[in-house]
Amino acid sequence: MSNININAEASQIYGLVGSNGCGKTTLLRHIMMIYIQDEGHVFYDDEEVKENTDIIKDFYYVQDNLFFPHQFTLSKLFEYEKIMYKNISEKKFLELVNYFNIDKNKNLNKMSKGQRKQAAFVLAIAAQPMVLLLDEIVDGLDAVIKRKFWDVLIQEVMEREMTVIISSHDLKELDNICDKVGIMHEGKILKEENLERMKDELKRVQFAVEGEFDASEFSEFNIIKSVKIGSINLCTLTGDAEEFRNKLEEKYKVLLFDKLSMTLEEIFITELGGAGYGTEKK
Amino acid sequence: MEQRKSSMFFPLLKNSLESKKNWFFLSAVVIFVSTLLVPFILNIYDGFFIGLGIFEMFVLVFINCLVDNSFLHNDAKMAYYKSKPATFRDQVLVNTAVNVVLTAYLLILIIISNAVNNANFDLFEVFKLIIPWLLAGIFLASLSSILAGNTLVAGIMTMFNFALPGIIYLILYFMFTILENMVTGFSANVLMQYFVNTVYKLDYIYFSRYFEKPLDCVYFLLLGIILTGIIMLIFKTLKRRKNENTGNFIVFDGYKYFASVLACLIVPAFLSMTLYYRKDIAGTIFASVLMAALTYYLIIAAMEKSFRISRLSIKVFIVSMAVFVAVTGGTVLFAGRYRDAVPDAENVKYAYVGSGTWGLSKVREYINENEDSSLSSDDMIRIYNSNGIVLFSDKENIKTITDLHKELLKDNNYKNDLWISSITIVYFMNDGKFMVREYVVDREEGANETKDELAAKLLNSREFKEINYSYIYNEKYYKDNYMGIDIYIGSDYKGEEVPLAVTMDELRPYLMKDIDKLFVNMDNAFYSLSDYHYEKYYPGYGEMGYYISLESRIRSEYDNSSYEVRTTRFRLNSEFENTVNYLKPELEKLN
């Protein structure tokens, strides 16, 4: 990884998205000081996060490939984590156990993948960290449980001003809950922006004109992508959509013009496409 | 202001001990069944079962160490524990402490078994040795688990690290073997013995010197230093551990190369020891380099999980071998300067020529303990009696030894019916230094006569006789150090021996007269000198006839009540005229 510069703020849900193997998990582990970077720093509240410092007590990391100690139940693991997390709340733990309907006395290693994810999430929330790092937390969960996850998470963020950094390939889910997004590719951050602003920057328009549309006449609008499906043209651009429409009307007879909203998934594909990812022809 | 993680050692230790209940219970069952129940059922109460219990304890503690530290070898486990507010340092120390508690617990169980069984097993003697081993083993298992990225490799590395002083010993020995092959007169055994006695005190490192010896403050100091050293390494390596390499065989590249280079030198070291009799130095060196390269390749290929090893690995091997060759070559060149050195007899206080060097360190201790570094006649005899080494202090005899030394440098061949492999010459100098040379004797035609002549001169010297036949020549020493001599008379024709009703005091004057004029044959004299008992070939030595057999009971230097028996036989032929005349009535009775 190189040139990584991300910034997540309090009360913010930060979505870390990227191509497969781009280094999302590695980045999360560097933030947690599981891996020690050759150079660079991680700051929390202007204080540098270093290995073996008490700051880590405010952090909680739930990894994708979950591990639970041998023969441990959720209750036993809660007791173990109680030694380490001073803010851990038994009340919250019990509430969440009930909310997710988990058997806290069942061997964690005998639970299903989904149940294990829920157990890990319950412990993470009960620990009441100030920074929560979730790696592919909703992977393999059904829609109902996902909804419960997001509800709990949003409530925690609002009530305790917790910062959440969440990495996922489920961009539709992140689209709904993230305040800010960092897009990673090949160990670098391609783009980091507030999600709404990101959506404002990139526009998608669909239009139909008389004659053949020539994108080269509109270079000032920075058209990233232009495709034609039947008689409809679809363009992704970073310039002003209204000005684009005006110029289009100057040059052509416009039969149809619509501004479409961009999803996170579309932004992701566009950004990675710009980096040459997924643009290979069959 | 940066805040260090506050220690969670004690709460984690408590938690860990609680979660180990089943393991403690299982261990107790294993120990009690094999040290208490099985001996009870079989009605056998000896040390074997306690020994078995101690072995099981090693296995149980070793397995527990590896299991406890296995969190460092699985990516998910490692990430889970490392992401927690408890430091790795606390977590590793907790595991180490749990294993120390387990060890103490198992030791107590063995003490109880020993007491209940009344097995009479001297546990204290064994514990003196195994407690440091267990403690060092536990700490080394933690260190090895940090260095390794895989639990199985961590186990192997624990054993490797434990054996590291021994491996270094082996490699040094290998170096000295090369030196021995290249510089005549230098012995790998002697050099290693000297090195181990003066610099590389392996018996201290492994605590073996305390076996059957009282403990002293050095024991505890040494144990403290070793454990502190390992803890420091644990802290250092934890700080530098590349956790992203978890799952690899070895996490640290530096350690990977260190272990590989050492391991690849062990194979040629064994090879050279096995083929010690080979004289083809160039061939042996070539084979050694080939074996080292092959071993290194196999180890690195296994560690890197690839048949194609990295350029860096090749560079490390070349540099390491270059360093090894440079150090060995330097030693060879240095020693080569002294190859032909034979001291002036005037500068030598004591000299020894004989078959080996096993008593050498004892003699050195003896001389060092003696404040003015001069030995009395009684001391010389004591050295002979306890080590089989005759030390010469007479300048004429020392001169004969230096002449023999010069002769050996000129020609190391000696051929007769008896086989000599090597001959050792040791000089203890006036200034306290000493010089040892060991010469391989080749069974080729050579100047036998000169060697035999010089050897016979030594064997027939008054000084040699006085030491070798101390019970005859030194009455006071005999009284002080011998618990008696039983004298038998025998006949080869009848094949029987009968005790003689004659005391040593009565027989001594006659034997002394005969031995005074006894002249060892020149033939085989060089062989006699290299024989452990200085077997002497005087005229009529091998003839059939009558003989007297002296069974000496020499008092042990450690324990006044125990003794060592040594038997000497004299042929009652014309060489022993005075003795034969004195024993005439007895001989007639035997007829």
Image (cartoon, helix red, strand yellow):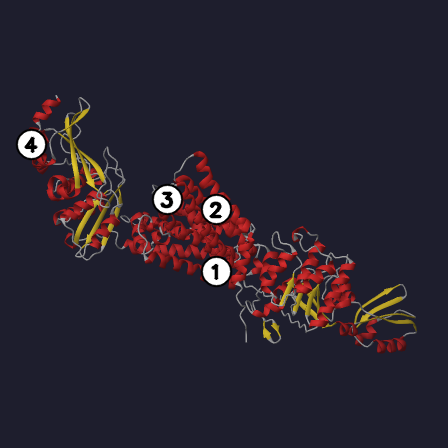
Q: In what element is the residue under mark 3?
A: helix
Tell me where residue A196 sits by quadrant: bottom right
> Residue B310: percent from the left, percent from the top?
54, 55
The answer as to whether the residues below labels 2 and 3 share one chain is yes
Q: Are dots 2 and 3 in contact, CB under 8 Å?
A: no
Q: Which residue is mark 3?
A: B273
Q: Mark 1, chain letter?
A: B
Residue at 62% across, 65% down? A1
Image check: B25 left or right of B48?
right
Looking at the image, tell me whether mark 2 or mark 3 is earlier in sequence order.
2
> Which label lies toward us, 3 or 1?
1
**Distance CA(mark 3)–CA(mark 1):** 35 Å
Residue at 44% across, 37% down? B40
Q: In what element is the residue under mark 4?
A: helix
**Distance CA(mark 2)–CA(mark 1):** 22 Å
Q: Mark 2, chain letter?
A: B
Q: Which residue is mark 1?
A: B234
**Distance CA(mark 4)–CA(mark 2):** 68 Å
Front residue (pair A152, A268): A152
> Which label lies toward us, 2 or 3?
2
Farthest residue toward the front?
B116
Amino acid, disc 1 = Ile
Q: Which residue is mark 2?
A: B59
Q: Count residues near mark 1 (Cα–Cα under 10 Å), then give few for <14, some for 14-19, many for 20+.
A: many
**Distance CA(mark 1)–CA(mark 4):** 76 Å
> Which label lies toward us, 4 or 2?
2
Front residue (pair B521, B444): B521
Amino acid, disc 4 = Asn
> Residue A167: percent from the left, percent from the top?
69, 64
**Residue B578 has which mark?**
4
Q: Are dots 1 and 4 in contact, CB under 8 Å?
A: no
Split into 4 quadrants, where in the image is the C terminus of chain A?
bottom right
